[in-house]
Every structure is written in structure tokens, then in C-alpha cells.
Amino acid sequence: MSDKHKQFLLFDELISVNQDKVDFLISSIKLLQIKISRAVKKKHKDLEFEFDLLGSLRTSTIIVNSKKIIDVDFGIYFHNFLNFKDAKQLIYTAVSNEANCRVEIRDKHIRLQYADYKVDITIYYLTNEMIIPRLARYSSWMPSDPKALYLWFEDVASSNIQIKRIVRYFKFWACQCLIKMPSGITFSVWVSKYICFNDRDDICFHETAKAILLKLKTGVYCRNPVKPHDNLVANLQPRQKRNFINKLELFVEQSGNAIKETNEKKSSDIWATQLGDVFLRII
């Protein structure tokens, strides 16, 4: 049986974002927020709003994906009512002339695509009387509370640092699959609920994948643990769900083979079929 725990710890370092890059990303976000604040105040002097860091940069599960791209997110919370279309157009206009990037309006966010990172800006409406914020989409405001979800995850993950490592492994594995996959926060919820702790990360990764696969055999579903308790994989079509299950079944099979393999080189080669050649660079 091959023990790849140390190799996985090095793999985690390789796919994680170093502190210098984190500092750069935070500076980039702050500059965007200044630009947005000025544009909003110029057009709507009485609007009250605030920003909040969201996504994997907040939960320390951020990775450099297989395409060498880093995903970062932040939200703007308006405390005065705006039409959802006006709110999205306002933010799009504020950042549309951002240099060295492509800007586009998507269903749930405004995306800025730079050379090696992308920033997703989500837009919310929230007053003191509201329990759940409303997210601006193409055609409506929808209930969504990412801050509550991230706080839930932080509380769960604080019990064992292995949780965040396993989340990062799943996120990087998903990048290799070249099909539509569940989101990073979905993997965070699944790992938090079904993780099989082990002194070795390779075994923990494999056993957690088995536990998730067993749970999803009756249907690919992920209940948001906080209000509005929506399905976090509702965006996946039936065919995409089947493709995901097929990929997960293959991962469970191959990772099991890698653990049972007594030849260290062959074991690493098997892991690399699922995690890419980056896994071989750390031997």
C-alpha cells in the first residue's frame, strides 16, 4: 500500500495561492471597490451600500486551477431599493472600462476576466428589516445569503484543518474533468457533511469521495445548510449530473487503486490520471 500523505501536503501547497498573490488580489478588489463607490455616489448620492469579501478567498479554500486561473468574489449590498436590472447595469458601467480585462454581465454576477485571475461581483439588496438578502439576477431578485453559508462552513471547518485541504483537492480534481461540475461551495458543504477523517490525506480524500458518492447515488442534491435552504446543484442539468456521477465513480475506483498499489511510482501515476501532471511534479 502506497502512502501519499506527504505528497498530498506538497500538492496542497502547490495548488494553493501564496500570500503575496493573496495580498495582490485583495489590493485589486479594493481598487475595484473604490472605483465602484465613486461611480455609484456620482449617479445616486443617497444610495447606501457596503462591500463584503465572498468565496474561497474568504474561506481560505482558494486554489490556482488547472488553467492557472484564480477565482475571487466579492459582493455589494445595497440598502436602498433599486430595480435588479438597474443595479446590475450600474455596477457593469462602473467597471466596464477596467484595463486589461474582459467585462461581462452574467446571470448572477458581473465578471471581470484578467490574464491569470477573474473577479465575480455579486449584487444584493438588503435592509435592516430583511432576514435574507436578495441577489440580482437577469430577471428577478432571488433569496441568497452567502455570508451565512461561509460562516457555517468556517464554523464546521474550524474543528479540523483537514477539511479545507480536502475541499481544495476536490476543487482541483473538478478542474481536471473538463465538464460542468458542482461549484466549490457545493464541494465545501459535501466535504463538511461526509468527510471521513484519516491521518493520511490520500485515504481521507478517497473515503470522503466514496461517502459522497454513496449519498448521491439516489440523486445529485446538495441542500444549502442555511436559509433559504435551496439546492446548491439546481443549476446542473440531468445529463450534467450523470456525467458528474460517472466522473466521481471513476475517481473512487482510481484513487482506491492508487492507495492499494505497492509501487510508489505507479501509485503516483494513477493519482495523476485524476489530478493532472501537477501531482507528478512534486515527487
Image: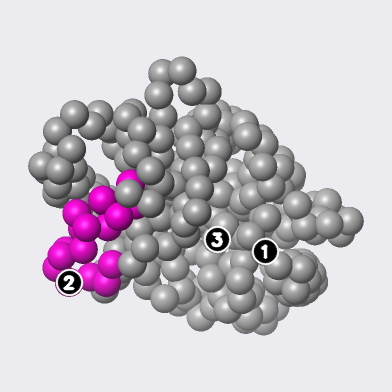
Amino acid carrying label 1: it is Leu
- Per the rendering, the mark at residue 236 is 1
Q: What is the residue that sits farthest to the right in this orientation?
A: 218
Amino acid carrying label 3: it is Lys
Q: Is residue 263 above or below residue 135?
A: below
Eye-nearest disc, 1 or 3: 1
| Residue 100 located within the stretch drawn in magenta | yes
* Residue 40 spot, x, y in % from top left: 18, 42
Q: Hey, which quadrant is residue 178 in on the image?
A: bottom right
- Pick the residue in front: 139 or 208: 139
Dot 3, crowdedness within 10 Å: few (<14), some or many (≥20)? many
Residue 18 in view in this figure:
no
Q: Which residues are magenta?
A: 87-103
Q: What is the residue that sits farthest to the top in this orientation?
A: 129
The answer to which of marks 2 and 1 sits earlier in the sequence is 2
* Residue 146 spot, x, y in % from top left: 49, 39
Query: Badge 3 is on which residue?
Result: 171
